[in-house]
Image (tube, rainbow, N blue to C red):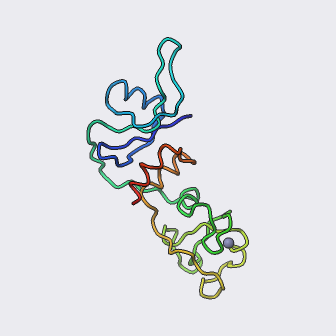
Amino acid sequence: MTRALVLNATYEPIGVVSARRALVLALDEKVEVLADTGERLGSASRSFPVPSVVRLRYYVKVPYKRTAPLSRRAVFARDHGHCQYCGKAAESIDHVIPRSKGGGHAWDNVVACCRRCNTYKGDRLLENTSLRLRSRPAAPQEWVWVKVAVGTVPAAWAPYLEQEAA
Ligand SMILES: [Zn+2]
């Protein structure tokens, strides 16, 4: 299903909806279409460009800063699918401080990890291994939830998400 990124009036990404829903909002003049997919939706006599990025014409107060819930998929999105120890393709997630040693299941203690590093590290603390973290894990940038929602972010969305990440 084609989806559209919804931006607040301030250009802050606030949601992802189906392209069909975005088109309805556009026809109701609730949103302005900033980018379309190049495809068309509708009948032969009356068709419309399929929205890819839309911006609300009015400002919506977002009650909380949206962050991605901690999940394997979200960790992979944050770490760009790379093992945070060796940089190879990640296949699992690792608790930096093992859970058996009191490490939490939290953004600052989980990283994407390849099978080899995971097996080598086992149940040990990092300082007892030769592994080093390439970066300190932290809660992801707010827009990671967008990546989690759609898997692959359409190219048309990137400029709007980079703005948020900057
Ligand atoms: Zn690795």
Residue drawn where x is 56% and y is 34% of the image: 1
Above or below for 113 versus 72? below
Whole-percent x, y for residue 69 in the image: 47, 57
Q: Where is residue 137 in the image (x, y as percent from the top left)?
A: 50, 71
The C terminus lies in quadrant: bottom left
Q: Which residue is drawn at 46% across and 69% down?
A: 138
Of residues 107 and 81, the one nearer the viewer is: 81
Vertical order, 148 against 103 (above or below): above
130 up-or-down from 116: above or below: below
Question: Residue 111 location, x and y as percent?
Answer: 57, 69
Q: Quadrant of ligand 1?
A: bottom right
Furthest-bottom residue in this view: 128
Of residues 98 and 21, the one drawn nearer to the viewer in this rendering = 21
The residue positioned 29% from the left and 46% from the top of the image is 10
The residue at the point 52 percent across, 51 percent down is 148
Residue 21, quarter of picture: top left
Quarter residue 120 falls in: bottom right
Position in image of residue 107 (x %, y %): 49, 67
Q: In this view, does 118 lie to the left or right of 145?
A: right
> Is residue 135 or residue 148 the one in the foreground?
135
Q: Nearer the viewer, residue 110 or 28?
A: 28
- In screen coordinates, is 97 left or right of 30? right
